[in-house]
Image (cartoon, grey):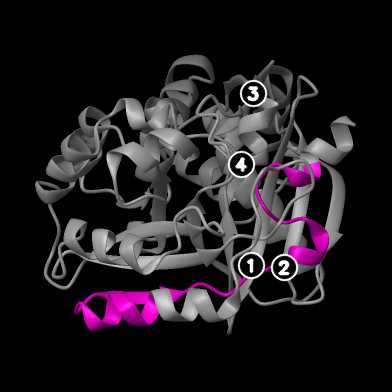
Amino acid sequence: MQNLIELTKNDLEAFVAEDLKEHRFRAEQIWQWLWQKRVRDIDAMTNLSKPLREKLAAMATIAWPAIARVAESRDGTIKLLLRMGDGALIETVLIPMQDRYSQCLSTQVGCAMACTFCNTGKLGFERNLTYGEIMGQILVGRQYLEDRGMNPLKNLVFMGMGEPLLNLDNLIKVLTDLPCERGLSLSWRRSMVSTVGFPDKLNILGDLEIALPAISLHAPTQELRAKIMPKAAKVHLDDLMAALAAYPMRPRERITFEYLLLKDVNDSMEHADQLARLIDRKKGKINLIAYNATEGMPYEAPERGKVEAFEKRLWDHGLTAFIRRSMGADIKAACGQLKADEVK
């Protein structure tokens, strides 16, 4: 039985033509029902004839990821623990942004990168998510907000569980289909891919011009990055920065560098100076994130004054830098925390 949300736009057109023996416009109708109208019952596709609905229902189903647990923060952040068809658990987070929500999307069950400050890394890697499991998170997120009369979901960040570029084939399929007008209708300009950085895969993403990367940097030198992100650091920082220097961008576009400040590890003025020497002022901007102390992890939160001084030091170097507001601390919104609790 074919789960229809696992079919890309092209796959659906082929399914309609070859399996259903129907005209191509039927694929457009079904696509709209699946992604724009978010139906979960084939019989609700009322502009299809009853015989066609019966034929389709005999061959296919519509199965979304199931909500296993919900945690809502005082600041409006909503974390959903989702169960996939095989029982695997992943997380997706809805973050309030003025008049809209942004959604952090997972691309893998667990993560193979094992960064020393990340709960997901401690859980290990299980498997890649499918096209439908990634897209299905958006269906669940939009429906959750709509059911509660909340602001719409308009922005996506591929920075939930997993390393997106290690699931590149499915990521590309998702990014290609997001802008479809009769579907989710989300411009690629509203999508950001957060990655530790793999030059060969960044080259592919850049050539396709379907997303801007956000680089999980977290250290200004190769040596320090190797200590806190040992697997990511197998790609030398010089090679990563060279790939980013060649990344195609339109005027006024910049690459975001994410920098998690860990107390007495990477938060000194010397680290700020090293970071300033690394980042191109015209092509990069720095997103500073103050670490939230987490049970069982070897790091502490930096002092607020030190975080602000770090930001100011970057400003003094002429860099665009800002401190990202910490969201969802009271519901363990950091990647992997909710799943870790559920597994325990």
Q: Position of residue 71 (x, y in %)?
A: 84, 58
- State if disc 2 and disc 1 touch (CB < 8 Å): yes
**Residue holding disc 3:** 124
Q: Within 10 Å of the Cα at label 4, are there few (<14), some (14-19), or many (20+) other Cα atoms?
A: many
The span shown in magenta is 311-338
Q: Amino acid at mark 3?
A: Gly
**Residue 95 numbered mark, or none:** 1
Q: Quadrant of residue 70?
A: bottom right
- State if disc 4 and disc 1 touch (CB < 8 Å): no
Residue 218 left/right relative to 240: right
Please report the residue visible at 70 percent of the width from the left and 41 percent of the height from the top. 336
Q: Is residue 89 above or below residue 19?
A: below
Q: Is residue 13 above or below residue 277?
A: above
Q: Quadrant of the N terminus?
A: top right
Q: Quadrant of the C terminus?
A: top right
Count of marks, rendered view = 4
- State if disc 2 and disc 4 touch (CB < 8 Å): no
Q: Amino acid at mark 2?
A: Thr
